[in-house]
């Protein structure tokens, strides 16, 4: 008889436990990546050496090449990971 009452008490106790619910929660974790030193080198400047049309063309071409290289470095930095929001 005691055993039956004990079993009944255990069953009643199990029924009163709260239902366990699970849910998936997404958490964003920021991971900062070191930027390689070669991507942070200053861009070259190309001052004019003389005041001629030929020199103006040389400087314009050199500056365009420098700008192209700097844009490639910035693209490589962006490819390292996502930017902050709003950028």
Image (tube, rainbow, N blue to C red):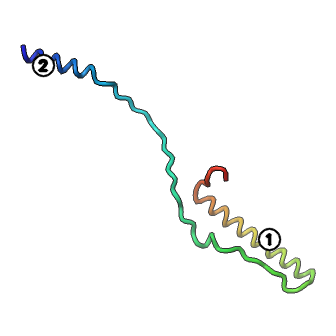
Work out whether mark 1 precedes mark 2 in sequence or the reverse, and give the earlier one: 2
Instruction: Please report the residue visible at 38 percent of the width from the left and 29 percent of the height from the top.
Output: 21
Residue 69 lies in quadrant: bottom right
Crowd class of label 2 (few under 14; some 14 to 19; many from 20; radius 10 Å): few
According to the image, label 2 marks what residue? 6
Q: What secondary structure is found at the residue carrying circle 1?
A: helix
Name the residue at the top extreme.
Answer: 1
Q: Give the vertical position of 29 relative to 15 (above or below).
A: below
Q: Quadrant where the N terminus lies?
A: top left
Q: Secondary structure at mark 2?
A: helix
Crowding at dot 1, Cα within 10 Å, few <14 / some 14-19 / many 20+, comes out as few
Q: CA gap, disc 1 to disc 2?
A: 88 Å
For this view, does 71 lie left or right of residue 53?
left
What is the x, y in percent for residue 83?
Answer: 61, 55
Relative horizontal placement of residue 8, taking residue 42 as reference (left or right): left
Residue extending farthest bottom: 50
- Count of residue discs: 2
| 78 lies above or below 24 | below
* Residue at numbered disc 1: 64
Q: Nearer the viewer, residue 2 or 54?
A: 2
Residue at (79, 73) in percent of width and height: 63
13 relative position to 29: left or right: left
Q: Nearer the viewer, mark 1 or mark 2?
A: 2
Residue 36: quarter of image: bottom right
- Name the residue rendered at 39%, 32% in the picture: 22
Question: Contact (CB < 8 A) between labels 1 and 2?
Answer: no
Question: Residue 39: where, in percent of width, then height?
Answer: 62, 69
Where does residue 86 sit, x and y in percent of width and height? 66, 50
Along the horizontal axis of the image, is 30 left or right of 72?
left
Whole-percent x, y for residue 61 in the image: 82, 74
């Amino acid at each position: 008889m005691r055993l039956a009452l004990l079993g009944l008490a255990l069953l009643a106790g199990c029924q009163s436990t709260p239902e366990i619910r699970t849910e998936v929660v997404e958490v964003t974790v920021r991971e900062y990546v070191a930027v390689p030193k070669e991507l942070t080198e200053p861009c070259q400047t190309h001052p004019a050496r003389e005041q001629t049309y030929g020199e103006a063309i040389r400087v314009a071409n050199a500056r365009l090449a420098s700008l192209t290289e700097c844009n490639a470095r910035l693209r490589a930095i962006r490819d390292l990971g996502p930017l902050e929001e709003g950028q």
